[in-house]
Image (spheres, coloured by chain):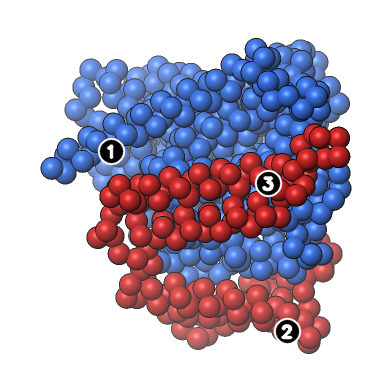
Chain colours: A blue, B red
């Protein structure tokens, strides 16, 4: 259960000079990757994860979490100044942000984005502080049988929400699951799908795969798009008026509620919540026709929602050990690398660690406000780094990241191959997120599944006779059917439009 | 759906067949419980169903016959091809030349082809960046990056 003393102890640890330093590094790096188009938080975490091995779990997770939520702040800068979103979650910000910049009001738009991000980020952290502990208490009662249901539901949500074709999401997930089966069987220790190769006995590391799938593939796509030198709009006067701030308070609160609530659901990414928040704000507005022409609320809503969603995503991660997005999956992987079992057990065994990370996120939000308000001019300059310098630099970091996971030169080939696979997946519309999520959850899904069958004496009926599991699996089936119907309807509508 | 998806469907079938061939004999343990082969068998079945689904879509005509290759054309194709080749060469070069020299060559090559930077700027930026990175990771973080045949 939540106790103030735990949170205060967390703050005491988060405010030590070393943790503050790594929190700042994470927040700054997050803003940096958020600002840069073509480099997102997932590849950044994937590249830096092996390198953080020198830090120890608490500073490492503080830094990696900082990269994740910091990237949501940075994404708005390029959306407003360049009409080029640094992150997908900042796409709706472009609609009004860039129009404001063209009207010479880039400063107030940037300030409002930072303020909304701060308010929503901080309020949703309060939600995380109060929601996660009771949920973890519930999760403590879960057996492997319930975990099978929970993981299947999480994977179903991610697969259903990614991409136009359900089959493509399933194929991506299928290959992800298959990759976790390569190596030694986690229960019997026998070789599986190694084809006699000793190198494959250690399996395919998900961090190496993530570096390829997300970082190298993204570079290849960007090279193809030939991103050249970018010219940035002038920022001008920074702060909005008091009246404008007052007008946007309710928008910030609505975005927080929406972002946090949706962010807790697996598969509902910050990008989805940003679009929903923008649309909701437009529908609630007395002058919806003004949206898209340069309205501050069009910046406040998506920026608040995407930040609230990132904090919301930590609720299932900390309570159940379930990631809600690819970046969260990387954080889950990071926790596992440090020998921590994310989920309810972690609240019992390492409560100090969790509260330190949560406290550091409060501190990180304050740092991000400072980094993104007075220093916004510096981040605007970052956008001007030519891609021809950035791309090779990122590729070199990819090589270091992939090599340092296990000090194995074979992993450099693995990262490269996954880079080419990731490029083809992106071009052909196969979402890479289900593959990564399955690579991280696959082992746990299999062991929970087999443990469940041992409990039932080999009967598959255990998955439908246990109420929680049956409900979760039922939800996964309903969701998939609903998603199939929705896809069929939209395909029919598109065909009719074509006719 | 497009033509390349058919290749993916065939790939799904091949992978499913190989996995089933490897895993079916280990489906059950001696106690009759699902063994180490069970999980891969389920995944193989999933991939086979997905492959079949693509095939059905294709046969029903739900495909974009006009869609060209997913690979780009013109200058974009040239840049992509050169970058891909550079990456493979970088990986091979790391075994021979070591991390520092291979990274230096990669950075110089990509800066030239992606940005058309002048030689002096290319060399200066590459040497400074790779030197800093190499020094930081080797000296400060004690990382044993590949040294190649030359030992650098």
| Residue on which the image places disc 1 | A491
Q: Residues within 10 Å of mark 3 (few under 14, many from 20)?
A: many
Rendered image: mark on residue B40: 3
Left or right of A432 in this view: B34:
right
Q: Position of residue B15 (x, y in %)?
A: 59, 56
Q: CA distance from mark 2 to mark 3?
A: 38 Å
Residue for point 19% across, 28% down:
A289
Task: Give whichever of discs 2 and 3 has the lower sequence position.
Answer: 3
**Compared with residue A19, is residue B24 higher up or lower down, i.e. above or below?**
below
Q: Position of residue A180 (x, y in %)?
A: 70, 48
Determine which quarter of the picture holds residue A19.
top right
| Residue on which the image places disc 2 | B96
Local SS, label 1: helix
Residue for point 74% across, 63% down:
A195
Q: Chain of mark 3?
A: B
Local SS, label 3: helix
Q: Nearer the viewer, residue A173 or A360?
A: A173
């Amino acid at each position: 259960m939540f106790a103030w003393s735990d949170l205060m102890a967390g703050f005491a640890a988060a405010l030590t000079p070393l943790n503050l330093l790594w929190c700042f590094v994470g927040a700054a790096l997050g803003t940096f990757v958020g600002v840069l188009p073509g480099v997102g938080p997932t590849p950044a975490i994937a590249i830096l994860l092996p390198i953080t091995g020198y830090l120890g779990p608490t500073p490492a997770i503080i830094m990696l979490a900082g990269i994740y939520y910091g990237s949501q702040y940075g994404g708005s800068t390029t959306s407003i100044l360049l009409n080029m979103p640094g992150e997908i979650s900042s796409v709706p910000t472009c609609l009004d942000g860039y129009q404001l910049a063209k009207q010479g009001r880039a400063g107030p738009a940037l300030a409002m984005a930072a303020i909304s991000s701060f308010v929503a980020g901080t309020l949703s952290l309060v939600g995380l502080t109060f929601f996660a502990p009771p949920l973890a208490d519930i999760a403590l009662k879960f057996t492997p049988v319930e975990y099978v249901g929970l993981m299947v539901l999480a994977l179903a949500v991610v697969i259903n929400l990614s991409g136009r074709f359900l089959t493509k999401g399933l194929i991506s997930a299928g290959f992800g699951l298959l990759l976790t089966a390569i190596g030694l069987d986690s229960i019997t220790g026998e070789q599986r799908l190694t084809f006699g190769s000793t190198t494959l006995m250690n399996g395919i590391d998900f961090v190496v795969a993530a570096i390829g799938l997300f970082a190298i593939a993204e570079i290849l796509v960007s090279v193809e798009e030939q991103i050249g030198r970018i010219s940035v709009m002038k920022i001008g006067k920074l702060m909005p008026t008091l009246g404008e701030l007052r007008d946007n308070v309710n928008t910030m609160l609505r975005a927080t509620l929406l972002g946090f609530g949706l962010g807790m659901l697996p598969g509902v990414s910050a990008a989805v919540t940003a679009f929903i928040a923008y649309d909701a704000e437009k529908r609630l507005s007395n002058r919806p026709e003004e949206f898209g022409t340069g309205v501050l609320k069009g910046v406040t809503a998506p920026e608040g929602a995407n930040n609230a969603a990132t904090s919301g995503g930590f609720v299932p991660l900390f309570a159940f050990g379930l990631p809600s997005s690819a970046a969260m999956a990387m954080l889950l992987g990071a926790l596992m690398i440090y020998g921590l079992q994310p989920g309810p057990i972690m609240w019992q065994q390492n409560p100090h660690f969790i509260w330190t990370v949560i406290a550091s996120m409060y501190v990180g939000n304050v740092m991000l406000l400072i980094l993104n308000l007075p220093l916004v001019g510096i981040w605007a300059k970052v956008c001007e780094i030519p891609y021809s310098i950035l791309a090779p630099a990122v590729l070199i970091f990819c090589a270091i990241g992939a090599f340092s996971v296990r000090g194995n030169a074979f992993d450099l080939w693995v990262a490269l191959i996954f880079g080419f696979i990731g490029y083809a997946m992106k071009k052909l519309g196969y979402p890479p997120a289900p593959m990564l999520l399955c690579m991280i959850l696959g082992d746990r899904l299999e062991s929970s599944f087999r443990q469940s069958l041992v409990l039932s004496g080999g009967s598959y009926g255990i998955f439908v006779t246990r109420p929680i599991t049956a409900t979760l699996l039922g939800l996964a089936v309903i969701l998939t059917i609903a998603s199939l119907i929705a896809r069929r309807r939209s395909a029919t509508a598109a065909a009719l439009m074509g006719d | 759906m497009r033509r390349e998806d058919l290749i993916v469907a065939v790939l799904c079938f091949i992978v499913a067949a190989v996995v089933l061939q490897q895993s079916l004999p280990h489906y059950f343990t001696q106690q009759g419980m699902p063994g180490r082969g069970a999980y891969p068998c389920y995944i193989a079945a999933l991939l086979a169903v997905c492959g079949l689904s693509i095939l059905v879509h294709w046969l029903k005509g739900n495909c974009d016959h006009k869609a060209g290759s997913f690979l780009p054309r013109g200058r974009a194709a040239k840049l992509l091809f050169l970058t891909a080749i550079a990456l493979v060469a970088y990986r091979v070069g790391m075994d021979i030349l070591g991390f520092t020299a291979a990274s230096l060559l990669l950075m110089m090559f990509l800066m030239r082809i992606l940005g058309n930077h002048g030689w002096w700027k290319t060399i200066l930026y590459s040497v400074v960046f790779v030197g800093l990175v190499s020094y930081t990771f080797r000296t400060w973080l004690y990382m044993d990056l590949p040294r190649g045949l030359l030992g650098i």
